[in-house]
Amino acid sequence: MSLGPLLRKELHWSRRNALLLAFLLLLLPVFFAGTSVLFQDVLPRNVPVAVVAEDDDVTDQELALVADTIDSYTDPTVVDDEAEAARQLERESVHGIVGLPAGLSDENASVTVTWTIDGSIVPFQSPSEVIGSLMQAHLELLFDADVDVDRQVEGDLADLPEYLFPTLLMTVAIFFAFTYVPYLLRRERAVLDRLRVESSLEALVAAKLLSLTALLLAPVLVFHAAAWHYDYAVASLDAGALFVLLLTSFFLSTVSATVTVLARFGAAGTFVNLVLMLGLLALSALVFPLGFFSTLRATIAGLLPTHYAMVVVRSLVLKDVSLATYLDFVGMLVGFTLLALVGLKLSLVRYRRTS
Amino acid sequence: MIRLQSVTKRYGGVRAVDDVSLCLGGGQYHGLLGPNGSGKSTVLRLVLGITRPTDGTVSVSPTTLGCGFQQPNVYPDLSVRENLDVFASLVGADDDDWREHVVETLRLDRALERRAGDLSGGFARKLDLALALLRRPEVLLLDEPLAALDDVSKARLIRFLREYNEQGNTIVVATHRVTAFESDLDRATVMHRGEIVFDRPVEAIDLEGCDSLQEYYVERLLAREGVR
């Protein structure tokens, strides 16, 4: 048995691939060990909520008092009008609205504070009941009036499978963009020289990105069939949601293509894309809304376009809202896509210059 | 015409091509000769625009180029026919008779439905050559075109290239084994370590007692290296 020579061969191989091994065995563990600090809470403690007056007689002092009181278990913001609060709820900027009626300081009054949540945000349904009970107890102590907290649900109550539906679809898009797209681009390496003579790298990559983005319609149809089969109350073929999903896929595919080109179609690009994919899946707050995370992690998620894409797709699939509500998010996604295209172009220029 | 003027190509600290001036075209059958690593392939890549010169200029007057690469450049996941279709469409080659003629000459017809990645080295080479010829290029650049071909296929290809050149097309063959092309070449450029050792019409070369151009250029290079 020639185990010894083969083990020596492994040593030679390891020496030749020291950078790759350092990446896999050192850098990647550092990344994952580091991200563990971002997961600090099991129950949401920083849930963003809007505190809004439902009556002109509510004073600024009452609004401020309520915000201060619920500050220990939420992240409250006093909002000027109910329409703005509703808009923030639609956009997942807040997960609940505390609506204050007049008469809170009247000891003879009996008032009802409304605690409105979004029915589509399933992970918040149970925590919102706990928060409602806490609010009830605290506000009764705070004000002279007899205070009752009434929990209301905006829109239809979704169930967990329906809630996860757009999340899983987005996960497929991210997975596709960071695995299949770079894999196919790497397969082009065998014929790159001929393609560069007969066409251009730009045309090659553009054709690849467009065709692969269109291919994403296949899993969309599979999900649509599943939704029909299970009788989910989801708008799985909503045009706005499809547009944002395909745009996100195109953006992420452009990023993964840029990495692939920068790595000169080599294996290093595959590993970098893998890390990007895992990072986006872990940090984009795809499953739980931002309010469930530590401030640091919520800040990171707030910097990632995939988070905003998820909010838009989830809202359009689960709620009866218009794409116009999220135009700034879509604009941001378009901006990131354009930046990614510029990055891709520069990577192609670099590739040519260093060939 | 294709002109290289004082062209140098460096890869890091290595000069793959060093101050090379060369003129290719005019319907000549041009041999670019030299041992491994002499810079022949880099000259072809410079002409094709795949790589850019570090110094000097490469100018290619309007013409159609076709190239057979040292490593066959084919889509391994597609069949031979699909490869031909894709590249014919890409270069706008719509002459079906010509395509059939090329396929028949290279004996590719019995491999049309096979996946390119499953082809033997010889068939992959033939497919690469077929792709180079698809649009009937005025200038055909071939990098070691006989590598991996059997003797019969070599003879067929040499005959085909001779006829193609007689039709007025320029052929540039980069090879370290000139014997097979020796009787056909109009001009020979010998390269060594990135430099041109000599560049002249074959008929003007004094073989200095050697039996063949192959023997002569090898002797010249050995002398240059101080080996006698």
Image: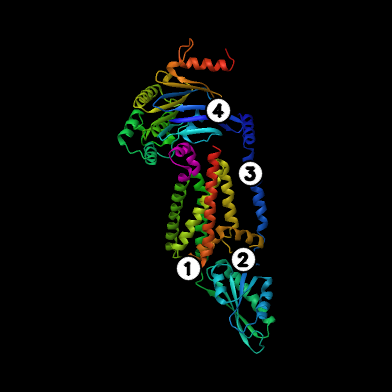
Amino acid under disc 4: Asp
What residue is shown with label 1?
A322
Residue A300, position as x, y percentages in the image: 63, 58
Which of the two discs, 2 and 1, labels the residue nearer the N terminus?
A: 2
Do callouts 4 and 3 point to residues on the same chain? no
- What chain letter is assigned to the residue under label 2? A
Residue type (three-letter) at the residue carrying disc 3: Phe
Question: Which chain is home to disc 1?
Answer: A
What label does residue B163 carry, if any?
A: none
Residue A202 magenta-highlighted: yes
The residue located at (50%, 64%) in the rendering is A162
Instruction: For marks 1 and 4, give the CA distance.
Output: 65 Å
User: Mark 1 touching mark 4, by CB under 8 A?
Assistant: no
Q: Check the image and report above or below for A134 versus A104.
A: above
Q: Which residue is mark 2?
A: A291
Q: Which mark is residue A23?
A: 3
